[in-house]
Image (cartoon, rainbow, N blue to C red):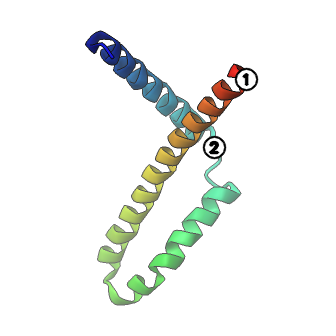
Amino acid sequence: MRKEDSESISILENEMENMIRKLYCNLIQEEDPADKGSREMKQEILNLLKEEGQFLEKKEYEKYRDKAFQAAAIAEEYGFEKGFRFAFQLLVTCFKE
């Protein structure tokens, strides 16, 4: 592959990533924070941290909990992006056949 082609592909991948991220952010802003999926994820995290809450001071536990929520949000965005890319590749494959 030529260097110019590789650079063009890299630019397109960055643009696609930015577009997917914007789409995700727009969807999240419109989402109801009290929806079932959000409540279930929050409860799962709190259940995972229940034991730590017994051994840590309140401030320390809250910092730990907040980091867990941040990690979950990052993972959710990453999963959205990967799922979107997979769906797009599947769609392209279907149209090729």
Say what amino acid the circle numbered 1 marks. Glu
Q: Residues within 10 Å of mark 2 (few under 14, many from 20)?
A: few
Q: Residue furthest left?
A: 3
Disc 2, SS:
loop
Above or below, 71 against 88 in this view is below
Q: Which residue is drawn at 60% across and 31% down?
A: 89
Disc 1, SS:
loop
Q: Residue at x 34, y 70 (%)?
A: 64
CA–CA distance between discs 1 and 2? 36 Å
- The residue that disc 2 covers is 31
- Decide which of tag 1 and tag 2 comes sooner along the chain: 2
Above or below, 70 against 25 in this view is below
Tell me where residue 9 appears, x and y as whole percent.
39, 18
Above or below, 61 against 97 in this view is below
The N terminus, quarter of image: top left
What number of labels is visible?
A: 2
Q: Which residue lies furthest to the bottom in this view?
A: 55
Say what amino acid the circle numbered 2 marks. Glu
Position of residue 81 in the picture relative to residue 13 (left or right): right
- The residue that disc 1 covers is 97
Tell me where residue 84 appears, x and y as whole percent.
58, 36
The C terminus, quarter of image: top right
The quarter of the picture where residue 30 lies is top right
Q: Residue at x 44, y 86 (%)?
A: 51
Above or below, 79 against 67 in this view is above
Q: Residue at x 64, y 24 (%)?
A: 92
